[in-house]
Amino acid sequence: MKKFQSIDIHAHFYPETYLKLIEKEGAVFGVSCSYDSPEGPVIDMNGTKTPPLDRTYFDIDARVASMNEKGVNIHALSLTQPMVYWASADLSRRLSEVYNDACAMAHEAYPDRYLGLAMLPMQEPKLALAELERSAALPGMRGVYMATRIGERELSDPAFFPVYEAIEDLGLNIFLHPVNVVDPQRLKKFYLTNFIGNPTESAIAASHLIFGEVLDRFPRLTFCLPHGGGTFPYLVGRITHGWGVREECKHLKTPPVDYLRRFYYDTITHSHPALEYLISLVGPDRVVLGSDFCFDMSYQRPVEVVCEHEGLSDADQEMILSGNAKGLLGM
């Protein structure tokens, strides 16, 4: 097995400054952080709790040791639930700032190991624009991280267009991740919020970006979908058929299937046949390494998932492990 550089674009990070700010000010908005567990801090989001966060979530030294063990060279650091949209405009702005500053500090400490994906208070587009301008100038910031919807607003909401325009002008790309899922009460049992809800959210977001003509309006802007694109790559035929027969979709001039390659997709499918299908559908030049570090739903050996995949040439492996991510991250 050849040794290629590896860049994980789906690697979650909870800086202590972010956790402490939630601990201090989040409870009034239904989000809290407790340090009562000896195993690590726990975030409570209106009754839904994270497992205790071990040191690899927030300690950059411990994290590097874990990356070495997993054979990953670089993490593009990203926040995850609860992100920042649940808070007031001011607290959301400050949560974004402390998170982005922590990413920059991690990069400065380990410039060859960490890059940052900026968090923005998107529920207030003017504040998001200000934080985008500030954070884009920070060391190691190479993209923008965003939920698959902002509160109850879809990503096709025109209020977000000025932010997209500014991101496009900066030459950055957007990495998506679910926060709230459709019909959460129905999915709460058996952890279906993650198993089914998260992949469904990615398909919904991709569809809104297509039918809401966001991708047409911003032709140089690229979105990266998590979890192998969720259900989107596997439903695109059905979506395209619907576009051809439904009047409410006729405003779109291009078949939805033609937008497949406007997205990038990470490798987190937990299924070799699913990953093989994804690569055959969109091409190896649109697939990037992801692990979901470091939750229980993550790949423990993300590089091996790619290198052990039969049918991938050395060139394909190198693209998926690092080459495509370098393009997305402007490296």
Image: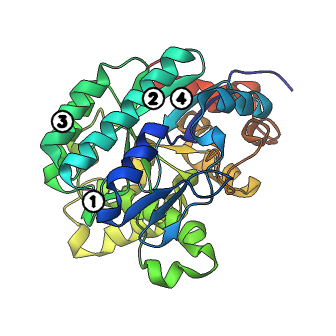
C-alpha distance separating marks 2 and 3: 19 Å
Residue mark closest to the camera, 3 vs 1 = 3
x and y percent of residue 119 in the render? 35, 40
Identify the residue at image location x=49%, y=84%. 186
Q: Is residue 106 left or right of residue 172?
A: right
- Residue at the far bottom: name it: 186
Identify the residue at image location x=82%, y=42%. 310
Q: Could you tell me if residue 193 is visible in this image?
A: yes
Q: Which residue is mark 3?
A: 129
C-alpha distance separating marks 3 and 1: 24 Å
x and y percent of residue 230 in the render? 53, 59
Residue mark closest to the camera, 3 vs 4 = 3
The answer to whether residue 282 is above or below residue 250 is above
**Which secondary structure, mark 3?**
helix
Q: Which residue is mark 2?
A: 103
Q: Which residue is mark 1?
A: 211
The answer to whether residue 16 is above or below residue 103 is below
The disc placed on residue 297 is: none
Q: Amino acid at mark 1?
A: Phe
